Image: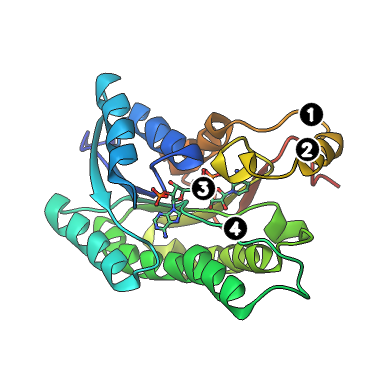
Amino acid sequence: MTASNEQRIALVTGASRGIGAEIAKALARQGRHVILSARNEEKLQEVHSQITSAGGTASVVVCDVTDHTALAKTIEDIAGQHKRFDILVNNAGITRDNLILRMTDEEFDQVIHTNLRSVFVACRAALRPMMRGKWGRVINIASVAGIVGNPGQANYAASKAGLIGLTKTIAKELAAKNITANVVAPGFTQTDMTDILPQQVKDFVLTATPLRRYGQPEEIAAAVAYLASEDAGFTTGQVLTVDGGMTMC
Ligand code: NAP
């Protein structure tokens, strides 16, 4: 809640499962009204039920982030309906892994379009209503791959590194408007995205992770909830890595 006790409005993309679903639940526990967005309406409704049965408030908006016109309109509609737009969590993301010598233009473009261009579009649409409210939180979900690279993920690593530059620029441009912008960069987290990886990759990750375990979506969500909180008002332009120590130097 705000100092004036008005409920803040948060949009979480990719909220139908995995990390996004847990981010939505964490923000709802903070007292935000959470708008859950993704393509799969049935799964979004499941997350909605979990939030409301735990005493939170949420609503569902089906939106494919690769439809950039629809994405911008979704944000404008939310801001119009609620007369405010406070928190934007750009979490929807995909992988299309291939070694660079075999990677097609389509694989590269699809990942950039989904993971990076959509975030630019969403931020551009959300920042104006945040400015009107004189308060805002942008949290973009990148990856350790965007910081240290990862074989087979030239497209994905480029998209996530791009998110870091985009977020830092937003932080600088909007700081005077009391809007913060930060990145959470997860390491290997147990979700559908990582379930499909070969066992040898999973085994390697464990040996490369000082905490010797995989991350859980709730642990990524906790970092996002902090950055979205009133307490995080002096934190902007940062990359919070949540990776079990994998990329520490
Ligand atoms: P996930 O289990 O595969 O879930 C991806 C989410 O994104 C789903 O809710 C999916 O919903 C949504 N999504 C995908 N394409 C979309 C589109 N075109 N339009 C709208 N929504 C779309 O992935 P995750 O592991 O939770 O990953 C969440 C974020 O964390 C991603 O940005 C990912 O890159 C990042 N990340 C994950 C890990 C990890 O180890 N898991 C590590 C680092 C970073 P629908 O299918 O219903 O549309």
Q: Mark 1 = which residue?
A: 211
Is the residue marked by circle 1 packed among few (<14), some (14-19), or many (20+) residues within 10 Å? few
Amino acid at pointer 2? Gly
Pointer 2 and pointer 1: residues touching (CB < 8 Å)? yes
Quote the CA–CA distance across marks 4 and 3.
Answer: 33 Å
- Front one among 176 and 57: 57
Pointer 3 and pointer 2: residues touching (CB < 8 Å)? no
Q: Please state the horizontal and vertical placement of residue 99, each as a whole percent of the image.
A: 76, 67
| Disc number placed over residue 52 in the picture, else none | none
**Mark toward the start of the polypeptide (2 vs 1):** 1
Say which quarter of the image contains residue 130.
Answer: bottom left
Q: Mark 4 = which residue?
A: 95
Q: Mark 2 = which residue?
A: 245
Quote the CA–CA distance across marks 1 and 4.
Answer: 25 Å
Mark in the foreground, 1 or 3:
1
Mark in the foreground, 3 or 2:
2
